[in-house]
Amino acid sequence: MSHKITRKMDLNSADFYVEVEAPLVAERFKAGNFTILRSNPQGERIPMSIMKAEDGKIAMFIKKLGKTSMELYKTLDTFENVIGPMGNPIDIKKYGNVVVASDLVCGHAENYAICEALSAVEGNHVISYQTYPTADEVYPDEVLADKVCDEYHLTTEDGSRGEEGHYIDLLEERLEKGEKIDVIFAGGALPNLQELGEMTKAYNVPTIVTVRQIMVDASGMCGACRVFIDGEMKLACIDGPMFDAHKVDWESALRRPNMFVEKETVATKLCKETGRC
Ligand SMILES: Cc1cc2nc3c(=O)[nH]c(=O)nc-3n(C[C@H](O)[C@H](O)[C@H](O)COP(=O)(O)OP(=O)(O)OC[C@H]3O[C@@H](n4cnc5c(N)ncnc54)[C@H](O)[C@@H]3O)c2cc1C
Ligand code: FES
């Protein structure tokens, strides 16, 4: 069964928005789940975070990175498969003061979904931080998480829009002042999630982060997405993708996503030569 893409829109020069018909995924989606996309019967399976699900459709934010994402941006109007929901959703409950933070495409999608789910729970004060490098990279207003949280902070690293600085530094300032934050959920650039974990450990703030790893089958069979949590091997596709940042073996989690760079570069080059990317 193929899935019709109902909307594509540029978010900035590198990232785009895609909405696709996927009623079975949409009706069971909970914040923190992801989906697996396949563009054609021979295509690779690529994992994507889900920003929102409504009216039988799911929405995603995608970066033009390599073969599949560039082909999707340029030529595709259907997906062969949209599988899921995959992975474990977050625990949707009362936490108190919740921070949801992001600095990259996948994290921004999760930010929206998590804010929407947790702000619906009485007793939560949901604070969203979305960090972009500069004003030029900020997504259009209609997809920012400001309308699904209680307190919103748009930040740019060069200060060209919103507050100046990365969310890690701005959060540290709040914690240093003694503000109470009960839990942090964060997604985005892996090295920054490591840094966030190191920072919040000192303040004893529980910090749950998305550990993005290469996924092949995404069903726990191949071991490609293995991560080490507190010394124990876990599979990001079925045990995650969100884990306690204070327990992740960051050295191996940061190394593994670059395993196939040479093959990916060749695939992208061939795709460009055929005009599909
Ligand atoms: C749980 C999860 C959620 C994600 N959410 C998003 C999202 O919301 N938006 C987004 O743009 N990207 C997201 N990604 C990353 C996305 O899957 C890769 O960018 C995509 O697979 C790239 O494919 P490509 O063919 O365009 O690029 P390629 O040239 O094949 O790969 C470029 C880079 O993408 C990563 N990657 C490649 N294949 C995979 C794979 N099968 N599984 C995981 N990572 C891979 C690697 O770091 C690789 O070096 C997510 C990954 C995971 C694991
Ligand atoms: S992707 Fe194969 S075990 Fe997770």
Image (spheres, grey):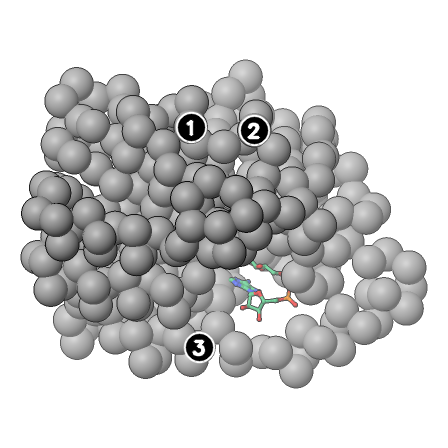
Where is mark 3, residue-wise? 256
Callout 3 environment at 10 Å: few (<14), some (14 to 19), or many (20+)?
Answer: some
Residue 76 or residue 221, whichever sits in front:
76
Residue drawn at x 81%, y 48% is: 74
Asked whether the viewer can see residue 215, the reply is yes
Q: Image quarter for residue 151? A: top left
Could you say where residue 145 lies in the image, as x and y percent from the top left? 43, 31
Question: Disc 1 or disc 3, which is closer to the eye?
Answer: 1
Q: Image quarter for residue 252? A: bottom left
Where is mark 1, residue-wise? 146
Residue type, label 3: Arg
Callout 2 environment at 10 Å: few (<14), some (14 to 19), or many (20+)?
Answer: few
Residue 53 or residue 38, whichever sits in front:
53
Up-down relation of residue 165 to residue 11 (above or below):
below
For this view, does 89 lie left or right of residue 45? left
Where is mark 2, residue-wise? 141
Residue drawn at x 57%, y 52% is: 134
Asked whether the viewer can see residue 239, the reply is no
Could you say where residue 147 lies in the image, as x and y percent from the top left? 42, 22
Could you say where residue 202 lies in the image, as x and y percent from the top left? 11, 64
Question: Disc 3 or disc 2, which is closer to the eye?
Answer: 2
Secondary structure of the residue carrying tag 3 is helix
Q: Residue furthest right?
A: 274
For this view, does 47 lie left or right of residue 96? right
Q: Earlier in the sequence, mark 2 or mark 1?
A: 2
The answer to the question of whether label 2 and label 1 lie on touching residues, with beta carbons closer than 8 A, is yes
Residue drawn at x 44%, y 71% is: 224
Quadrant into which the C terminus falls: bottom right
The answer to the question of whether label 1 and label 3 lie on touching residues, with beta carbons closer than 8 A, is no
Could you say where residue 266 lies in the image, as x and y percent from the top left? 75, 78
